[in-house]
Amino acid sequence: MLRKSFLLLSILCLLNVNTWSQQWWYGSFDNICDDREYFSGYATSQTILGARLDLGSGFEIDSVHEIYAGLNYMFEYGHKPFANPIPDTGLANASWNPIVDLYYKYQVKNFRMFFGSFPRHKLLNYPLALLTDTFQYYRPNIQGGLGELSGDWGYQNVWCDWVSRQTYTAREQFMAGASGHIKYGNFYIEDYFYMFHNAGNMISDSTSHVQDNGGGACYVGYNFDNMTPLETLRFDIGMIGCYDRFRPTPYTLHSGFQCRLSAFYKYIGVDATYYNGDKLSLVNGDKFYSNTGNYARIDAYLRPIKSKHTDSKIGWSFHIHDGKKQLDNSFQVFFRVDFLNRKG
């Protein structure tokens, strides 16, 4: 597997067609430390330690058309390289094997499209209630397509991610959704939605194996950035909802309200959220939301290193639920470098 992947990358990177006006290399490095000390049983207590390298080449066909090819690999500390697929992720094809970057990008002034296998970093930023942050660790690429309109008013995108092709042992899984941030003066609206189709494998003998699961959120907020010395100060409130069913049983619906606060100044920041409502039956959401309907999370963090090509975060998160006195907590240390000359 590794030998074939590097052979494919080498061939793609060495290709140099005269019609391509520019060729460049791209790369990024991530160091991940996420220590989760959960005593409630609402979410899995674990420590995730690893390093990820994304390396490849891009080719500019003309001013709007580009092609990228590379490899994206995460080595999780304490495991053998290229080990067996990761268990209990909810994703049929999540693994430690290299992930291929291979995609086409089209970009004009207010519109861009991606087709292929491309990094989700900076493209999708869903609330944790809908999509857990472990997606970025173990499934960093979208494998499908994304289209996005943008302008002074904000942005709106639609996307599809083919998670797993159906075989005799693997389920057919795909996700599709839309998200956006629309602003008017200091007011803004954020919208998020996705569906998760979780079908059976080739030997499934009933439609009862097919699961329809998904959810959405909408927030209305106000941006105080230009009213205070802070670089960021935002507050919003909104509603989260989800649906779930195993065919042919009826849909079950769940919903609740959430408020969010984000503040940042120079090197220090705080993010806080509070959710109250039904337990959310989302396969790919943060497990705290599926186990409690009264949940607050406070993230205090430092960003000691930040520049054009580097970013860092040292954070401590506190999880408060059901009025319990004992706190679940988690500690994170992240470091990212975008090096070489990644254009897109």
Image (cartoon, rainbow, N blue to C red):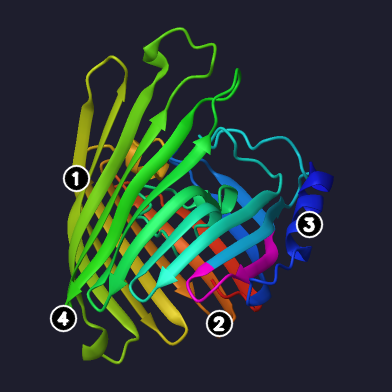
Quadrant, the N terminus: top right
What's the mark number on residue 304?
A: 2
Amino acid type of the residue that numbered disc 3 sits on in the rendered structure: Ile
Q: Mark 2 or mark 1, which is nearer the start of the sequence? A: 1
The residue sitting at the right extreme is 3
Is the residue under label 3 in contact with that under label 2 (CB below 8 Å)?
Answer: no
Which tag is nearer the camera, tag 3 or tag 4? 3
Amino acid type of the residue that numbered disc 1 sits on in the rendered structure: Gly
Which tag is nearer the camera, tag 4 or tag 1? 4
Q: Secondary structure at mark 4?
A: loop
Point out residue 124 in the picture as x, y percentages from the top left corner.
41, 59
Q: What residue would you read off at disc 4?
A: 185
Q: Nearer the viewer, residue 32 or 175?
A: 175
Whether the magenta-drawn stretch holds residue 60 is answered as: yes
Q: Mark 1 or mark 4, which is nearer the start of the sequence? A: 4
Amino acid type of the residue that numbered disc 2 sits on in the rendered structure: Pro
Q: Residue at x 70, y 67 (%)?
A: 17
Is the residue under label 2 in contact with that under label 1 (CB below 8 Å)?
Answer: no
Q: What residue would you read off at disc 1?
A: 256
Q: Residue at x 69, y 54 (%)?
A: 73
Residue 110 quadrant: bottom left
Q: Mark 3 or mark 1, which is nearer the start of the sequence? A: 3
Q: Mark 4 or mark 3, which is nearer the start of the sequence? A: 3
Q: Alpha-carbon distance for marks 1 and 2? A: 36 Å
Residue neighbourhood size for the residue with mark 4, other residues' Cα within 10 Å, grouped as few (<14), some (14–19), many (≥20): few
